[in-house]
Image (tube, grey):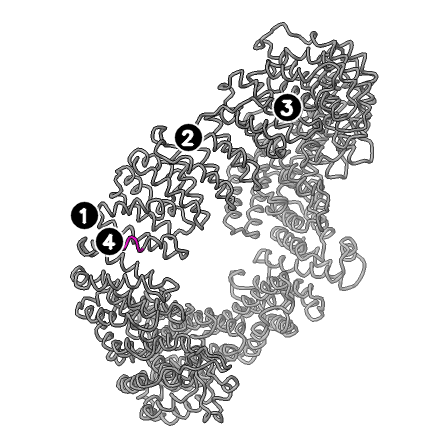
Amino acid sequence: MPLKEDRTVRHTGGQVDELVMALIEAAYDKDTTVREILGTSLFELGKRQPHLVLSSCNSFLMKHAKLPQGHRVVLLSSMEKIITQTIGDIDRDFAVEIIKQASAELTQSKDVIPDWQSAASSVLVAIGMQHCNDVMSEMLDKFQPGVLPHYFVVQTLASLATANVFGMVPFIKACLGTMLPMLGMAKHDNMRWVFAKALASFCEAIIEYIANIEKAPDPNVTTDFFVTEMYAAWDLLFNVWLNSKESKLRSAIIDALGQMSYILMPSKLQDCLPKLLPAILSLYKKHHEPHLITQGLYMMLDAAIQSDPTVLESYLDSLLASLFPQICTVVDYSNHLAVKNHNEILRCFTVITKAFSSRLISFLLLKLDTGNERVRIGVLAVVRHLVNAAGASLDKKEDLILSGLKLVLNDQSNKVKKVLAQTIIAMSHHGYLELEGGQQMIEFIVRQCSLLPEGGKRPADPEYVSNESLRSMCDSVLNLLSTTVENIDRVLWPFLLELLLPEPNTESMSSLCLAVSNIATRKRQANDEDFLFDFNQQVNIPKPTEIFMRLIVLSGFPTNGRLRGVNVLKAIHSLGPVIHEKLPELWDNVLPKLTSRLEEMSSSGEYSQKTWEELVLKLLAKSLDQVDDETWTTKCGDDLCKHIPLYASMTEEKYFLFKCIGVVMRKSAKKESVNRYIDVVFANVKHSSPLEREGCAMAMGYGAASHLDVVLAKVDALGKLDAKRTSGFLNFFKDASGDGEEKVKATLMLCVGYITFNAPPELIESRLEASILAMVNHQLSHVKDQTVKQSLIRSVDQIGRSMHPDHLKKNTAFTHRNNLLQHMKNYVKNESITSLTSETRSLAIGTCATLIKLDPKLASSELQDLVKTLSASVIALPADPVSQSYEEHSEYEQLMEKSMSSLSEFFREVLIKDMTEDVLDLLFQQLYPWTKSTQEHERLRSMSLSYDILTLYMEKCNALGGSHFSKLGILLAHNVPRCSDPCVTIRQKAFDCIAILLRTSLKFEGKDPQSSDPFIDTLPSLKDKVQRVDANIMFSAINDLAKVLTKKIPPNQLTSFMDGIYEALVDPQVLSSSGSCVILNGVLKARGGELHSQVDKVLVALYTKLQEIQHSQTKTGTLRAIRTLASHHLLRVVTLLLDEPLPLSQNVVEIWHVIGQDQQLAAMVIDQLLEMIFRSLPYEEMGDGKGKEKPSRRAMQTPLAVTCALTELSKSEECEIPVMNCYPRLLAAMLINTASMVGSRPPRVDKDKKDDDRYKTTFLTGELKLLPSTVAVDGLKQIIAASRSERFLETLNKENVWALLTDSERFCDGFTLLARCMAESQPEFIPKLINNLNPVLSGLYHPQRAMAAAIFAELISQRCAGDMTLVDMLVNNLLGRLVDGDQLVRMLCIRGLGNIADAGATHVQKYCTMVLSAMMAGMDDKEDTDDIITLEAMSGLSKILAQVSESDIQAILINVALRIRPCFEKERTAVRATAFSLFGNLAAFGNGPSKEPFLEQIHTNMVSLLLHLNDSENEVKQACKQALRQLGPLVGSSRMNTMFQNHLLDGAFLHYGEFMNDLSKTIIEDLPEKLNYYVMGNVMFFKSVWSEIRSNAAIFVGFLLGNMPAEQCTHISKEHVCGALMQLLKDPEPEVRIRAAEAMSLLANI
């Protein structure tokens, strides 16, 4: 029913009534954010005036029946929030009013309108928390028997039952009594849904009431009170409503039936089950979101089983048939309803397990035997859940579960494996694994730890489980089992040892060994009885030697198998007593150190596989020695042989296993065992694998150390069989390994080498002649296969090493050396010089180095041929492979490094064999052509070899004191070009070579080559210099090198040095030729007198080479060598140079540089150029050539050419003195030129030059190709640089002055900065600069006048560097230009006059009147449309005011304040900021005679200042902060002043709202007489053009009125203010409406 209209608002009598009503009316704003704030404002007012706001909303809703529904929703939502906060303040009568209106809103429309009616329902529920009886009374009036209630009446009853259990339960029986007859009347699904929801809520409330009966008002309430009604409702819901086609309704019904199940009598529930469960289960097919069905089903099952566990027996099959398929579906974990349904299904299985565990487990295990992956995953998920949750219900079912899970142990699906692993870890915590079959579960986990990464692209399946993720999980599971699961040792020990041997577990060894180590260490430390066991009784456990050999082989490559090394070593250590009782003594000492060594090598990145293998083999050998039992040693060897198949696909491990067999052979005393091991190794080696061949050969070598004849006889027999091509061992090995015959030969040849080298030295010579060389020679001449060739080469190398006197312990001549050497040279010759694909080259060269050491010495011609062949084969190789793949490039680099290393070693051995200058010269004759190659890599390789040779020669040569180094001069000249090579590494190598050559010369002089020498000792520092990128530093080092060479080259070597250096001037590398030129100049300057007989030859050579030189630096160096010859022609060259086209060519630039190096001549040229620049026309003004009137400027040729000349001329260091002698005049000329060129176009070329070839490209456009402003600025910059004032130049660079000077809009700022920097850095030049610029201020060209005005303005600020007479002159000059026709010049004059404030008090007083008048006139400039003069005038005033006394300003103080006030609201940011700053500066004069009128101005402008304190521009904010701090002491409130000083700090963040709130409180207390003025001042800003200011004004008013005591409000025109605020609620800007609403929320007491 509609409410009666006699209900009135509970008014306060204040303006807040109107504000509340305005907020209510505006509450449905079009902007959602504003709408939220309006609602919040109502809420804030409602918290303080709940009766007003609630009654206003109530009345508004009542009176506006046609109010939009959205508007009603906002009001009702606000009411609900207010009631929730203030429920204790609402009396019953008022509550009843609200209840009735909310009830009316609830039922006003018969249709269901969720937003509106749910808001009304929320109001009733909120007020029902305190006045439940009244709400229920109202609801029951609308809940009459026989009449179907409104949907939301029932919804409200349901919500209230949930919200207020203790208040609602007493009404439930009555509600049920009324509701039950209505249920049959509900025909629509929505009504049935809400009734079902209400019934569910009632049941929940009853259950919660009884669960907390000790706190309930009536402790006698039980479920029996409601059984009858609930059964009646149950019957209807189940038999009638459940047949609905609407899934949402059915879900609600199921939920209600589930809740009712706990209230019904057990017998009643059992009676219902035959129909209930099938009906509910059938609903699964009809629902996409079945979680409510499952939840209800769980409650029914749980309730039914509580009274009789067997009651569900007849329904079990159907339950499982419905629930199990759902558990097998993929769970979408992003859908919380799907996850909830999954969890509820698992809870249902838990309930079923309580009564039917056997049947359920059997059912699940039968499902495992299916091909459906999802079914198996579902079974495992249920089993895992039951293991964790079912507890005692699964007693005595553990064996059955374990047995059943065996079916999936070999499943191929990673998804199934993942869930199974999770199930296993769950079972481990409940003792399952201790039963039979538990070990199979452990074995499953270990197998998963061996999974290898898959290849290819990851499938799109979101549930995809990769091998890596599954393996990682199982690694963690195995570690968890071995460390945290209680009593797990009974399962894992010693079972895990059984898993060490199977080949499939090899990849899991890291995790497996960690687990073994964890358990064994724990047991060993605890002295557990079962730690040591009888291997004979544990027949499945591998024997000790098997375990040891397995682990020792795996430790050989510790970085394989996911870094298994550390864990394998820990396992070996922990198993010491288990493997042999003698080993712990050794291993406890050695293995911890070995483990630490491995960890250090891995972490430092210095891991060496070769070193590590030696350490592990040493451990094996020591272990065999420690046991000292031939039988045990034999078992180890036999087990190694037996393990070979485990590593069929693991080449590295197999290689190491062969080496371990070799160690065992060396330790074995039984020849039959050795023979057997050799046969096994050759039978299993894969001859096509280089690594396996190496392992086999090394094993034979280790064996030969103790059984030379046995091993040699076996290999010799195999070789003879090969030669005869008969069947036998060779064919057997070939067939067994599947390799070709050539690969078998390669293995045999490699074995020969290792056997020879490892043989006892005393037996080598005899066996070499008898059999070894025969086997090798047979293959040397006929080998074609690359693999066999490499094995032969390595074998020959081993033979050569074995024949060295150091190895044999005696001197002997190897007669077969030359033959073997020739074979090696032929192998190298046969290698390609365009590619590098194998080690053959490096191996052969290395073998040559080994053989060259042996006697007899090689003949000179043979040696030269050998050196040439080997050098060319390596140095000429390309720098990079043809292919661009990373792998091939990396392989090429490695092969190249090996080849260079081998060649260097060969050169060293050649020189060591015959340490003479002839051999040294022979080597360098072969290397020199490569040192000047155009290819960097060839130069680098040859220089590296040169360094190695020279170093060795210096150390080993037998120089006699007093002799001379005859090759010094030419070798130095050959190395000089490389000292400035483009490659840094080559440069350093060259310096090293020169240092070595000079120290070698000392040795020939009879001195210690390492003795101190003042010149040679400087070379290391020069070497450091040349590695820098800066070419100047490098050439400085080269120049210093020249000084060293001039002192150290002996006279008899000077000619040979000069002959070599001429050629260096045309070195293919331009840096090298330039460096050589520097050396040449240095040597000529110091030692040229010694070449008096060679002058003609020198000059001819220089001129000849000059024609060939292309590099500019080299040309410059050569020109310097002949500069004296050209000095007489420089003056005439000046005119020719100025006529050259611009920009200058490089040749002309070089000539200017040469001129600048002669100070006397340079001074004359500068004077001539300055006269030209002052006399010439800077630019011409003209149209744009298209008939338009807009003028443009075009630069003239002469001043630009002069500028370029001066720029280049002054770059010479020698030109410093001529520049400084006329520096002020030069600087003035450059400043004038720079001002003239800003914005100017390039000059045109004269028509009479059209036929000049130099100008042909220019005539394509008719203009010179340069930017005049850039040319001028570059010249200015260079002149300043030439003045050697680094501080001046550094400051200009830092201030980015050069960019400003080329900007036509900001070039005056650049001149200002330049003047400031000059006053600081070069004050001594200021007077002369002013004298040179004075005429310019009155000149014809306005850019020049602007430049002069800008500089003079800044010089006034800088006090003309202390010369105050100059300040007077500049002030008068600027005053005279205030009427200049150019606006920019006038502005700069105003700026300069304002800068008088910086000149001191005397000058301020002297010019005060004139300057102030000028400033005031500037503020009134009618042509100043952009406010630039006004802005400058205000800035100047601010500065002047800081210097003048009050008497000087008193007459115009108020006038100034009035003039600047309009500027507070100017659109331009800088103007507003400057105006506020100026007003703040006026505070200095506000405490004298003008105090009262100025204080009035402060209060007049205070509102504007405070509002702009939150201006959109930061510059204005900072200006307002400063102004308020300045005005604070005058405002009349010490607390306001304190706030201004403490909170309004420059750069600090200001929370404007909090600050204004606090400030308003202070204003109210300290300035009550100004409150009305401030409030009305704010109201005026409600119409500001800026939305930020309107917003600030609104919130300021809100703070003022909101914090104002009631008695002070009487002086405020509250009606006007509130009316204005309410108008802001209609502002077009959302931000303004928001602030207005927030302000109104503060006015609860108005």
State the residue in front, 885 or 807. 885
Residue 1077 location (% of width, % of height): 40, 82
Name the residue tied to disc 2.
1646
- Give the mark toward the camera: 3 or 1: 3
Q: Which numbered dot is residue 2? A: 3
Amino acid type at image mark 1: Gly
For mark 3, give the secondary structure.
loop
Disc 1 to disc 2, how far (Cα)? 40 Å
Disc 2 to disc 4, how far (Cα)? 40 Å
Residue 220 location (% of width, % of height): 63, 5
Assess whether mark 4 and mark 1 are in contact (beta carbons under 8 angstroms).
no
On screen, residue 287 above or below 1354 = above
User: Which comes before the other along the chain, label 1 or label 4?
Assistant: 4
Assess whether mark 4 and mark 2 are in contact (beta carbons under 8 angstroms).
no
Residue 146 location (% of width, % of height): 75, 15
Q: Which residues are magenta?
A: 1453-1459
Q: Which numbered dot is residue 1488? A: 1
Disc 3 to disc 1, how far (Cα)? 71 Å
On screen, residue 1468 above or below 16 = below
User: Which comes before the other along the chain, label 1 or label 2?
Assistant: 1
The N terminus sits in image quarter: top right
Amino acid type at image mark 4: Leu
How packed mark 4 is, by other alpha carbons closer than 10 Å (few <14, some 14-19, many 20 or more), is many
Image quadrant of residue 1408?
Answer: bottom left
The C terminus sits in image quarter: top left
Image quadrant of residue 492?
Answer: top right
Amino acid type at image mark 2: Ile
